[in-house]
Image (cartoon, grey):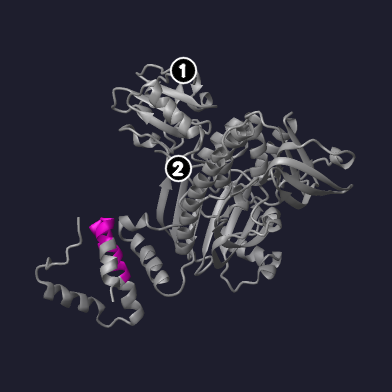
Amino acid sequence: MALNTLPNLPDHDGFYAALLAAHKGLTAEESAALNAELILILANHIGDRAVLDAALTLAGQR
Amino acid sequence: MAYDYRPFPYAPPPGLTAPEPRHPVLIVGAGPIGLAMALELANHGVRSVVVDDNDVVSVGSRAICWSKRSLEIFARLGIAERCLEKGVTWKVGRTFHRDREVFNFDLLPEDGHRMPAFINLQQYYVEQYLAEAAIAHPLIDLRFKNRVTALSQSDHVRAEIGTPDGPYRLEAEYLLACDGARSPIRGLMGLDFKGELFEERFLIADIEMEADFPPERHFWFEPTFHPGQSALLHKQPDNIYRIDLQLGWDADPEAERQPDRVIPRIERVVGHSDFRLDWVSVYTFQCRRLDQFVHDRVIFVGDSAHVVSPFGARGGNGGMQDVDNLGWKLAAVLAGGPETLLESYDRERQHGADENIANSTRATRFMTPEDGAERVFRDAVLRLAGKAAFARAWVNSGRLSRPCTYPGLGPDADLPVGAAPGMVAPDAPVAEGWLQDQLRGWTLLAFNHDAPDVGLPVLHPTGDNARARYQGDAANALYLIRPDQVVAARWITATAAEVTTALSHHKEGRPWP
């Protein structure tokens, strides 16, 4: 399966707010730890190396 | 009970008084790899001289975990029974974070395999058994207190050798450097390792104590008894326990190996002081290898060619697979076969070393993360392991050694995945005993298949295990097995001409197709 870079998440504004809320009041270090867990949880859920590799590449583009 | 170190006898070599005839093989180093190499070559009818600058087995337990594949190789070398009888068989590994178990594995023995997944046995026992077998073997000339001081090569190798009675010269068709991670031969040839050195120090200790610890591998991340670092506990024979403790890069190795520093650390691990310190060392990690293992007539085998961090049992076991791979090929070359076979040793064992190095590097990185993202993700995995099943398998305290699958073998067919070309032919009980015992040279395994007449022995293994591992759901199956028990090629059905083509290809060590 290819990485889906088109709109895919209903209520993305709501998720974005939830993401910010999860980080609210955290230090930079605590935020980094939360993000790391999130990435690992989502990576396992996606379960497809090709999709994850494409995501790594896209995220690394400058 | 402490091991009774007995020096092996030194005898003045014949070369001191008269030139010796050129030997087929000179093996440098009488450690587990050099001795196994000599015995494996002797199995193929090849004589060797083995020289070692020392005259005792290894001091300290060093390599302790011997894998199923190593035990299968030991069976061929005649020491497996002694190793199994003496060693501690184990199959359960437990990984802890702080005081909570986060991951465990149970290497359940599959039905119909002779050898367990692992035994723990101190390297000095393995060396002793190998040395005794080598001393008893008429094709092996084992010379202690013989040190190579210089070497050169042309169409053969010349070595200057020092002994307590002075120097002499030896000539050999091939020199096998089995002289360990600090390989003096590598130094004499000006070769260097490439790869990673980890800025980390571990304390390693053997202690003797009466205890009821189960025969399991225990690994702790950040245990309360050793805050912020990692620790490993392994049971060995003779009431000897092996403890590895991460110290950090700033630790002073000389100070840390002093008993007044070591003993309090061990007391915190085992919870009491009723033990005897048997051996202590401090080590750093490397995951590195030579660019090439074959340098004309000098061939590097084991730690002299590649070194890995110890978590995963890939040093000694990886070296045994080098021995397995090289033995029949060198024997064939000495009998007039093509030297391309030695290129295939180089190619295949570089592949094996790279796999071992990759696995060891990943485990080491997990155990000793650098500050920054490495540590953030490592700690995230450890935290997640307490609350999500998937993350437990991500906790990496060393992925235990299995033989690699060699690329470039074939042809392949739609047959069971566990017996693909490049893999070790799986063992199975057969009418005559064990299948692997029947695989001592080029062999065909036929399942509901006529025996093609290509001048090779043909076995028709029976029994459910053999059928399941080789034939599966296919109507027929035919396998070509190399002398190192690696599957070279397989077919659903094949003509004698097809088998001959594959056989001659593999006998030249060329990658398929």
Looking at marks 1 and 2 on the same chain, the residue that comes earlier in the sequence is marked by 2
Q: Looking at the picture, which amino acid does disc 2 mark?
A: Tyr
Please tell me whether residue B28 belongs to the stretch shown in magenta.
no
Helix, strand or loop at label 2? It is: loop
- Residue B87 in the image: x percent, y percent? 60, 39
Overall secondary structure of the magenta section: helix
Whether tag 1 and tag 2 are in contact, CB under 8 A, the answer is no
- Amino acid type assigned to the residue bearing label 1 in the image: Ala
* Most foreground residue, B13 or A13: B13
**Is A43 part of what is drawn in magenta?**
yes
Q: Position of residue B496 (x, y in %)?
A: 40, 21
> Do we see residue B13 in this rendering?
no
Residue B401 location (% of width, % of height):
49, 47
The Cα atoms of the two marked residues, 1 and 2, are separated by: 29 Å
Quadrant where the image shows the N terminus of chain B: top right
Quickly name the residue at label 1. Answer: B431
Front label number (1 vs 2): 2
Instruction: Please name the residue shown 28% across and 58% down the image.
Output: A44
Instruction: Identify the residue position indicated by label 2 in the image.
Output: B406
Left or right position of B2 against B223: right
Say which residue appears at 38% left-offset and 71% top-offset: B376
Mark 1 residue crowding within 10 angstroms, few (<14) / some (14–19) / many (20+): few
Direction from residue B112 to residue A2 in the image, left or right: left
Looking at the image, which residue sits at the far front?
B155
Q: Identify the residue at image location x=69%, y=70%.
A: B255
User: Which contiguous range is marked in magenta?
Assistant: A36-52
- Mark 2 surroundings: few (<14), some (14-19) or many (≥20) residues within 10 A: many
Q: Is residue B280 left or right of residue B97?
A: right
Labels 1 and 2 in the same subunit: yes
